[in-house]
Image (cartoon, rainbow, N blue to C red):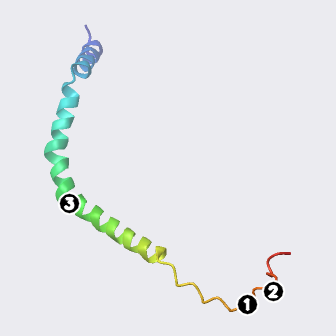
Amino acid sequence: MNKNQLRNGLRQSVVQSGMLEAGVDRIISQVVDPKLNHIFRPQIEQAIHEFMAAQKKEAVPAPPPEPESQDPAAPSQDAS
């Protein structure tokens, strides 16, 4: 067997065994998850709060202007 065949055979064995996925999952649980909770989560929450506050400001409608008193018998100008 030459080097390329050996390398390809080893690569297929590792992929099929699931060791690679287990290793990646372990790295994520040990490295990424703690950083996610301590570093990224507060920033994400702050961004969401700021976005929601901006949405609330836009969602609060201005009070409608008081309607002018019109004669109920007068036809509407919109109806042509």
Residue in view at x 13 percent, y 44 percent: 30
State the residue in front, 71 or 56. 71
Label 2 SS = loop
Q: Quadrant of the N terminus?
A: top left
Residue in view at x 22 percent, y 21 percent: 14
Q: Pick whichever of labels 2 and 3 is earlier in the sequence.
A: 3
State the residue in front, 80 or 18. 80
Disc count in the image?
Answer: 3
Quarter of the rendering containing residue 20? top left
Query: Rounded to the nearest whole Å, what is the CA distance between mark 2 and mark 3?
Result: 65 Å
Q: Residues within 10 Å of mark 1 (few under 14, many from 20)?
A: few
Label 1 SS = loop
Query: Rounded to the nearest whole Å, what is the CA distance between mark 1 and mark 2?
Result: 7 Å
Residue 64 vs 20, above or below: the answer is below
Q: Amino acid at mark 3?
A: Ile
Quarter of the rendering containing residue 39? bottom left
Residue lying furthest top: 1
| 53 sits to left or right of 31 | right
Label 3 SS = helix
State the residue in front, 65 or 15. 65
Residue 74 - label:
2
> Which residue matches tag 3?
39
| 67 sits to left or right of 54 | right
> Which residue matches tag 1?
70
Residue 36 - label:
none
Residue in view at x 29 percent, y 17 percent: 8
